[in-house]
Image (cartoon, rainbow, N blue to C red):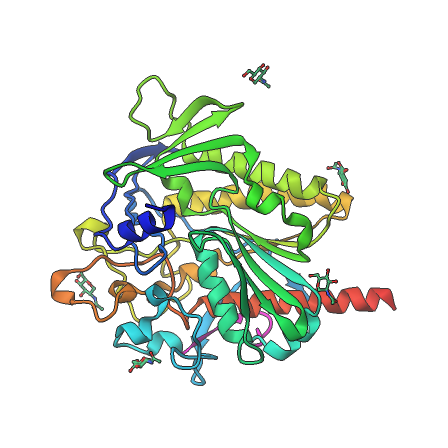
Amino acid sequence: MSMAEEEKEKCLGDGSSSSPPSTTIANHTLTKVLGFAFLGGFCAYLVFSASGGSFFPSDPSDDGDVDGGCNFFAGSWISNPSGPAYTNASCKYIDPPNDCMTNGRPDREYLYWRWKPQSCDLPRANAEKFLNAMRNKAWGLVGDSIFRNQLNSWLCLLSQVEEATDIYHDEDYQSRTWYFPSYNFTLALLWAPFLLKAEVSRDASRNYDIKLHLDALESTWTNQYSNFDYIIISGGQWFLKTTMYLENNTIVGCHNCPEKDVKDLGFDYAYRKALQLSFNFIIESDHKPLVLFRTWLADHFEYGEWYSGGVCNRTEPYKAGEFNGDATDNMMWRLEVEEFKKAAAIGSKNRTRLKLFDTYHLSLLRPDGHPGPYRKLHPDLSKKPQNDCLHWCLPGPVDTWNDLATVIALNEEDSRSSSMK
Ligand SMILES: *[C@@H]1O[C@H](CO)[C@@H](O)[C@H](O)[C@H]1NC(C)=O
Ligand SMILES: *[C@@H]1O[C@H](CO)[C@@H](O)[C@H](O)[C@H]1NC(C)=O
Ligand SMILES: *[C@@H]1O[C@H](CO)[C@@H](O)[C@H](O)[C@H]1NC(C)=O
Ligand SMILES: *[C@@H]1O[C@H](CO)[C@@H](O)[C@H](O)[C@H]1NC(C)=O
Ligand SMILES: *[C@@H]1O[C@H](CO)[C@@H](O)[C@H](O)[C@H]1NC(C)=O
């Protein structure tokens, strides 16, 4: 059986998972429960989590993109009667697990919000303007399945002007490249869920076996790095899985492993290594694309874990201050901002163009944006189906990330052309 067939077979299974690991970080005992659920010919990846521990507030970083005096990442969701830029009927690039409309999600309110930065307005992405500005250019999105969400949203927005052609995909449809012929514009997803080199396999009981090299980057993105004018890069929830950590091909520790003689280093340790190594690579590279570092994304499971009826059934965004994220999510975001600041300071002396794409808070406020049970076509709610409270419905909040990326890219092109005059 080929890898793809095997994945498909697993995908169509019941999405069983590993047992609940328990982790202690910074005096908060957190229980992260990991599970995996899949749909269709390729797999959507899910992490189900439920966290105890205290809640502490955090603010959008000052290092968010401050273009023309506006921090685009600090603001609130306001009513938007005009609704989304596309629908399930007008866009053919929505993957079934994200196609909440077609799958029968009954409420519609989640489609009628727009992000309002405190001190300015965020324009909706203008596909024609964007494609014109991106003529002969290429974007690479480096990370996990959350970028598949974003990429599909982008295809939906841009296909209003021109249809994209699928010019490359790997066996599992994880890395993928799309091309807009009239604009010679390339948009690619480079699959690197850990950013680091990882050996990922699954055992008979469908548990992941992951060996993560803390001293080597994943070549899917580093080999192609010089092909891109713009990069969006991020780490994510894969770091929460049970993982063995290697350096110089030797086991140096793990996260949540049963082996008693292996030291549990904690996933924050590995994540910091991943970020440091990635930022060093970016700073040291001769190629200098505009690199947007996308911050952590929280999930929105409530009323339990994935196996005990955890759901995300809210139908409205949170208001400012109503929900400040759980301890693990806040910790990961803080760790990112810390490493980003260090890297940006070094990189600024080195022509490195590094910006924080700080979607953590604005996404945290959208518990209503997930498929929940509608990751499947017309789910039987009486059977309490597994929910997806990590990925996002399309159309949905992810479209806003592309509005943000568009503004940043257009500003970048403007400033570059004016500096050439
Ligand atoms: C879009 O979703 C609606 C339900 O909201 C459904 O009736 C319709 O068939 C869907 N369209 C497509 C093209 O899937
Ligand atoms: C198309 O874009 C690529 C960069 O993405 C560039 O190297 C190539 O020269 C462009 N082709 C043409 C015909 O302009
Ligand atoms: C890595 O391992 C090899 C042997 O496998 C050893 O010769 C080398 O010194 C090690 N390098 C480091 C930096 O530990
Ligand atoms: C700065 O970038 C150059 C490549 O452009 C690289 O060779 C050098 O190591 C970088 N300096 C630092 C401090 O990273
Ligand atoms: C959401 O689900 C929980 C648990 O099933 C339930 O108690 C609650 O009433 C639901 N909320 C809404 C708004 O449907």
Closer to us: 187 or 168: 168
Residue found at the far bottom of this picture: 82
Query: Dividing the image into 4 quarters, which one contains the N terminus?
Result: top left
Residue found at the far front of this picture: 1
What residue sits 66% from the left and 44% below the top?
A: 282
**Is residue 115 within the magenta segment?**
yes
What residue sits 85% from the left and 65% below the top?
A: 420
Q: Give the image quarter of residue 108.
A: bottom left
Q: Quadrant of ligand 1?
A: bottom left
Side (left or right) of 16 relative to 53: left
Q: Give the image quarter of residue 240.
A: top left
Closer to us: 47 or 268: 47
Which portion, as a residue range, is magenta? 112-123
Residue 93 in sight here: yes
**Is residue 137 within the magenta segment?**
no
Across and down, in percent, residue 112 comes to 40, 78
Question: How many numbered discs sit on the rendered protein?
Answer: 0
Side (left or right) of 64 relative to 370: right
Closer to us: 92 or 106: 92
Across and down, in percent, residue 321 comes to 40, 60
Residue 342 in sight here: no
Across and down, in percent, residue 59 comes to 50, 54
What residue sits 65% from the left and 77% below the top?
A: 129
**Location of residue 103 with respect to 217 vertically, above or below:** below
Query: Dividing the image into 4 quarters, which one contains the C terminus?
Result: bottom right
Residue found at the far right of this picture: 421
Residue found at the far left of this picture: 382
Closer to us: 264 or 17: 17
